[in-house]
Image (cartoon, rainbow, N blue to C red):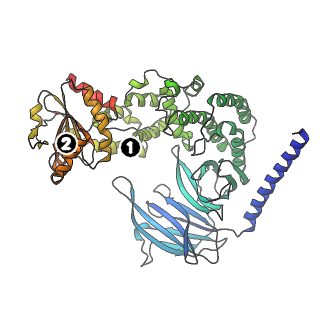
Amino acid sequence: MTLKLFKVMRFIMAMTLLALQLALTAGANAQDSPGLITGTVTEKANLELMLFKKINKKTEMLAEYKITPENTDYAFAVPTDKAATYHLMINVMKQGHLRLESEKMLTFPLTISAGKVLGVNITPSQLDTIKKTGLSVNAAAKNGSLCRVGGVLTNSKVGGPVSLLRVVNGQMEKIASFNTSGSNLRFELAVPVKEEGFYYLSTLRWRARIYLKPSDELEVSADVVSGKYSVIKGSEENKWMEKWQNLSWPITSWGYNINVYQNGINLDQYFVEYEKLQPAIVDFKQKNGIANQNFKKLFYQAIDIDNALAPMYLFARSSSRKVNSLDAAPRNGSEPPSFYRQFIGDGRFDDAAMLRIGETMQYLQLYGKLRLSFMPERKNLSAAEQLKIKMDAINNETIRSVFLKNQMDEIEINNMSEFRETFLPFEKYATTPAAKKKYKQLHDSFIGDTAWIGNSSYNFSLPDADDRIVSTRDFKGKVIFIDVWATWCGPCKEQFPYLKELEEEYKDKNIVFMGISIDRVKDKEKWLRFIQKEKLPGIQLLDDAGHTFGRKYGVMSVPRFLLIDKEGNWIEIRLPRPTDKENLKRYLDRALQG
């Protein structure tokens, strides 16, 4: 291709892109302004708000908004249709045993007009569709903090939901979403913004960072395949963000902001491209003309995070089957390439403002795992020792508290002993409300077990496969490892191969392996056949539906593993699973040593 022809083709492509942008802008200006719904929830509650549109007996959900006790204001931008009727569905949530659950769901009709603002305030405790209470609807002036984010998806045939996410303690949390379709790829989102900062647009495939100030309007064109976006209309801050996106593309285009990992990335070539880009990034930060100093500080922190996290995340995804994990052995069973040593220096987590960036918690997690992966002794470190190394890398107490809450969610704790060993040394960092709450929940979930520890286990007896009554008294002088299971329990069956390996490894030790099934006595024949089929080793006992042993020791779910010392006293009534072999062996070895 000649240079002249190349220049002509580049000019044609530029004109095509300009025409597309003008068309999008013209389309946005030509259509009616969307109707706006703004409001607040007058009580602290968890709600799901869903806006529905009905035309010719066909109902579809247009948008949804999530309300939390900390986020009670909401908004919808609604492309109006004179032939349509609209209604708002309110799902009031309550805290269940493990998660939020629906308490009541009500639907209210709304009249929405193009370019008009509708004020809709909600009082959850008074909601009643028959009495028509709990919802106050009035014409409203435009909220001064309200931001509109709209745009068009490109390179998509089916559309799908476009979500708006806010940043909460270094992580992204969905606020609102708008449903697009193959026939209409335009989305409209609105959100009250009281304090300027980063937000994120996302689809099922990608996410993009944006910056919003009160009353901002942002119009974008977003490529669904690549995750790259263009600012059609928007603030200077978002135009700078687009420039950073384009500059960093050589190190992020592999799928940094995409949920679908691209295989076949050559890490050595990536390292070369990364080093080549660094002078341009330094130049970009030194020579820009950013006027908004609040944005500038946060933007620079985001640039630094992207510049470190993109290569770290690439290695994590390419070296492990589990996304976001460096737990699997790096390639060739060795430590990561020396290229990655530059990312584990000190002083990276000393400013709490980092928590206003949605990737910060992911960065902290991968940073800690990467730091550990360079330590030869990492395989012998306990969960408590690993957590100490990660916490020591953080200099800011607010970040430490937020990270501690994250680790309490991530690290599996089996009993009060592990809780004390792992988290008690960091109790002083549980300072944020979320960290305090999680710390107390974990502590309280195990505190009841301590009543049994050190006490005698000689208070139960159960029949074996031959109907002989067996008691732990029969094995005084031996350590007893108990597996509580059931024939209908899938997770129990998953443990059997590891359990057999463990018993084989300890067959010459002074330990008894005992299985206690909580199947019903009426299903005894099924239990016996199962034992024979699976060739389950050790002593097998039957606890009729858990009425004897299970009820006494609060066995609410199986599998469950327990340990008795040589004197017949309980060591632990909750142990790691056999799949966590090395951790479990620590308990068995200590018990055998007395």
Element under disc 2: strand
Q: Is residue 67 left or right of residue 565?
A: right
| Spatial CA span between label 1 and label 2 | 37 Å
Q: Is residue 258 left or right of residue 479?
A: right
Residue 240, position in %: x, y? 71, 44
Give the residue type at disc 1. Lys
**What is the x, y in percent for residue 103?**
38, 64
Q: Nearer the viewer, residue 222 or 168?
A: 222
Can you tell which of label 1 and label 2 is closer to the viewer?
2
Q: Which mark is residue 436?
A: 1
Say which residue appears at 64% left-offset and 27% top-offset.
268
The residue sitting at 77% across, 63% down in the picture is 26
120 over 573 or under it: above or below: below
Q: Nearer the viewer, residue 399 or 533?
A: 533
Tell me which label, 1 or 2, sits earlier in the chain: 1
> In which quarter of the view is residue 251 placed?
top right
Q: Is residue 544 above or below residue 401?
A: below
Q: Residues within 10 Å of mark 1 (few under 14, many from 20)?
A: some
- Residue 437 in percent (x, y) is at 37, 46
Which residue is depicted at the point 58% across and 35% down? 314
User: Is residue 577 at all visible to an observer of this figure?
Assistant: no
The answer to whether residue 534 is above or below residue 371 is: below
| Residue 516 circle label | 2
Quadrant that contains the N terminus: top right
Residue 379: where, in percent of width, then height?
A: 41, 25
Residue 417 in sight in this render = yes
Q: Nearer the viewer, residue 72 or 576?
A: 576
Q: Secondary structure at mark 1?
A: helix
